[in-house]
Image (spheres, coloured by chain):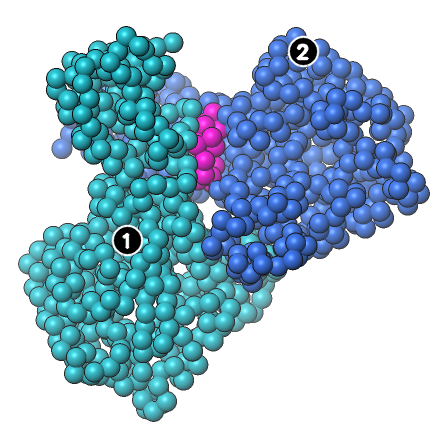
Chain colours: A blue, B cyan
Amino acid sequence: MSGRFETRAFDAGGRIGELTVPRAGVTVETPALLPVVNPHIQTIDPAELYTTFDSELLITNSYILHQSDDLREQVQSEGVHALLDYPGAIMTDSGSFQLAEYGEIDVTTEEILRFQHEIGSDIGTPVDIPTPPDVGRERASAELQTTQERIDLATRVKEELHEEMLVTAPIQGSTHLDLRTEAARHADTSGLDVFPIGAVVPLLNAYRYADVADIVAATKRGLGTDAPVHLFGAGHPMMFALAVALGCDLFDSAAYAIYARDDRYLTVRGTEHLSELSYFPCSCPVCTDHTPEEIETMGADDRERLLARHNLHVTFTELRRVKEAIRSGNLLELVDMRARGHPKLLDGYRTLLDHTELLEQSDPVSKDAVFHVSAECARRPEVYRHHERLERISVEGEVLLSEGSPNEAYTETWRVVPPFGPFPRALSDTYPLTVEVPERLDRSSYESAAAGVCTVAAANPQTSFTLAHYDWPDSALERLPERVTVRQLG
Amino acid sequence: MSGRFETRAFDAGGRIGELTVPRAGVTVETPALLPVVNPHIQTIDPAELYTTFDSELLITNSYILHQSDDLREQVQSEGVHALLDYPGAIMTDSGSFQLAEYGEIDVTTEEILRFQHEIGSDIGTPVDIPTPPDVGRERASAELQTTQERIDLATRVKEELHEEMLVTAPIQGSTHLDLRTEAARHADTSGLDVFPIGAVVPLLNAYRYADVADIVAATKRGLGTDAPVHLFGAGHPMMFALAVALGCDLFDSAAYAIYARDDRYLTVRGTEHLSELSYFPCSCPVCTDHTPEEIETMGADDRERLLARHNLHVTFTELRRVKEAIRSGNLLELVDMRARGHPKLLDGYRTLLDHTELLEQSDPVSKDAVFHVSAECARRPEVYRHHERLERISVEGEVLLSEGSPNEAYTETWRVVPPFGPFPRALSDTYPLTVEVPERLDRSSYESAAAGVCTVAAANPQTSFTLAHYDWPDSALERLPERVTVRQLG
């Protein structure tokens, strides 16, 4: 790692960062989306991506340029920036995608890295092996070995070039989570700059967001916090919030253009076909200026360009929304909202919360936000952290844990608020105990509060505890240890 | 009712309708938002509302015009359409708001209705008594009596005028739900045209969405399905989906302008202050052309106008999104998503589901949609309807209800899918049994499935049932009657 990535604001595992791309002389704010630009077909001019969509970084495929009879010489002589007429930074892919699709490619890591350097790429990529999901451990492990050798080779080539081109260290391992973690640890020590999580596209295509969440979390466990993570091939706005909350910083989208070609319209709730829409559920300039019917009756080229523009607007807007959510401390509320777009996204969200202890490491101590918006919220990092804290609080005598008023008959009275559980009154005004909770709580919140009672009781075995509650469900009360006296209020 | 409201697409309690406003010669598609235009201060010109925002119906206050030294004669001579330079339909309020604010007003129902007629209003309003929430029953009942007398008077005035001006019949009753239902029944027989649910603004200001949901449901129980319902004073896009799903058709917004004056920025997740925003979480033309910083450093007038335009864009876009959701059959998924914006909205959503039997009456029999996106979904109308249907299915012999494969040892094998519960295999391909559910189900889904087993067992007391399940939680298994044999699969 070259110290070229700096993070500033955090929320859950998400962060706002700055990736310095020295060869381009630009600093890209993350989370960022790299539009994929096909050197042969440009639905939206790269210059428009830069000016209208403020996109400072795009990705194109150096293997296509390398193999192209008509473009190779031109890009070698004038450079990729001139070829695409793009003033921002350009990342280049290596042909790994073609390797995955067609089984073989006609270039080595060393050749393609030198070619990328030659054409002026700002971020280059070695030829890794994109092992698909669900393959046996042996194959995943063997192919990972090859990927790692190529990363080591890329490190040497980068040193020899003595140039400022950043180079990526792709992380593979299929759906074997321990291999992903091991791959991440290796990549982290490679001296390379950007860390694409590879070969998740088949999972994304199958909406296997739970598996993606596990893979991202496994990868993050092997990387330093200052490693910029690229979720390679992920460009649908419906899952940006989830992926960012897990710690992804870069995305790339070919979808904006490919979907537009098929009259497909992106939204943060999923994908719609133009012919299915009666109203545009979007406020972007395309959607406020036109009706679905108007666009449907246009010529194919106009239609494709307008849909691609809409797709870009919704994509870049979701990233701004994600960044604003990180800054405001309500990224997980946004994830929660997005999870209601599809049952598989809900699976992804529930899986993200399996990794709450990982997210807790970067989650801010204090936020200015309401958070309790679903049953899932009882598993948020704030609740985890509160229970961790309860393990370290000593209290003596006869303690009343009460949802009601203090009682002088006890040594002290603590407050109890689901989903957190008990806490000394002195903490009442500290986050997260200040958050607003719905009046109609779900059982998981009471059960989580009961778990908090268990924690404080276990941490203070000599102390006597009484819990005074308003009508907690049996499923919560059953969790309490016998030595806690239970009293119903009201 | 004058048969001037026709509904066509339904989803839960929501519908797309057409309100014919004969005096204006326009038909307004609902759900619709009426921008509130202050005759004295127009942040956005009414003509721009019509052309840029496609708003075909606005509301202005006839009492302000009536009391205005400088505008009264002008509006009497040239009419309210010319005064506001607005070619769409105009609804006029009567001064009830001023009555609620200042305790008295200087006009009678008859005077103000005749004045509204004189100035060319397309939809007029009597002076009802906006009883605030939480008042005693006696006061609510007495004031409702007065409101009803004025509705009766309005009916007579409308008949005398022999004109096409529509007239509203406001529904009061404070937070006394039976009074709201009674008021709705009375209004429904009044012969008037549009039904505003009155005096909910204090509840909306306090985010008491649960109470609003109960009030709307109570009102709907007293109205015919062909009555257009106006949730008076509701203009925040964060609650449109919820209110439409309960059966509201019209909204009005002064917020777009008033909030803009205070640098407040509307979103579907709540309200933000401009100074708190680093990124605009919106794709509207204002937000794609500017950064928060740019707008903050503008002069007050430009800033106010741009924020008002954004506020209108986000408001009208949410209504398009709601209409598209109704048409696509995923309105409740949108409500579910919006409920994650604030704990009080979640209370509102959970309260809406208390009225699932009401929503079920208009909910389509078949939809092309995924729906299981939260624990709350186990209480949706589709599940309610499935359980109703189970009560009517007869089955004999020894029946296996199984999450696994059929077993020939039984008379027949039914499938079991949470949250629905059991059903004959022949129904497998019918909605809603075709919907996608998450892999990680919540307990409420299993419990709801168990309730389905209870229903079918109760309906067939002579039949023997065996449930074969994959690892259902105890909270579900405990609900089963003893005579159902339980077998764990896998």
Looking at the image, residue A138 lies above or below residue A200 = above
- Element at label 2: helix
Residue holding disc 2: A139
Marks 2/1 in contact by CB < 8 Å: the verdict is no
Tally of marks = 2
Q: Is residue A338 magenta?
A: yes
Q: Nearer the viewer, residue B339 or B408?
A: B408
Query: How far across and how far down the image is residue B98, in percent?
Result: 25, 72
Horizontal side, residue B422 vs residue B373: left or right: left
Query: How far across and how far down the image is residue A36, in percent?
Result: 71, 41
Q: Which residues are magenta?
A: A334-352
Kindly identify which chain the residue marked by label 2 belongs to: A
Query: How far across and how far down the image is residue B5, in percent?
Result: 28, 64
Magenta: main secondary structure: helix
Query: How far across and how far down the image is residue B355, in percent?
Result: 22, 43
Residue holding disc 1: B247
Name the amino acid, label 1.
Answer: Gly
Q: Nearer the viewer, residue B378 or B405?
A: B405
Question: Do pointers 2 and 1 mark residues of a single chain?
Answer: no
- The structure residue drawn at horizontal position 29% and vertical position 28%, both measured from the top left corner, is B420
Horizontal side, residue B256 vs residue A24: left or right: left
Q: Quadrant of residue B340?
A: top left
- The structure residue drawn at horizontal position 35% and vertical position 28%, both measured from the top left corner, is B428
Name the amino acid, label 2.
Answer: Arg
Q: Is residue A164 magenta?
A: no
* One can see residue B203 in this view: yes
Residue count near mark 1 (Cα–Cα under 10 Å), binned few <14, some 14–19, many ≥20: many
| CA gap, disc 2 and disc 1 | 57 Å
Horizontal side, residue A106 vs residue B389: left or right: right
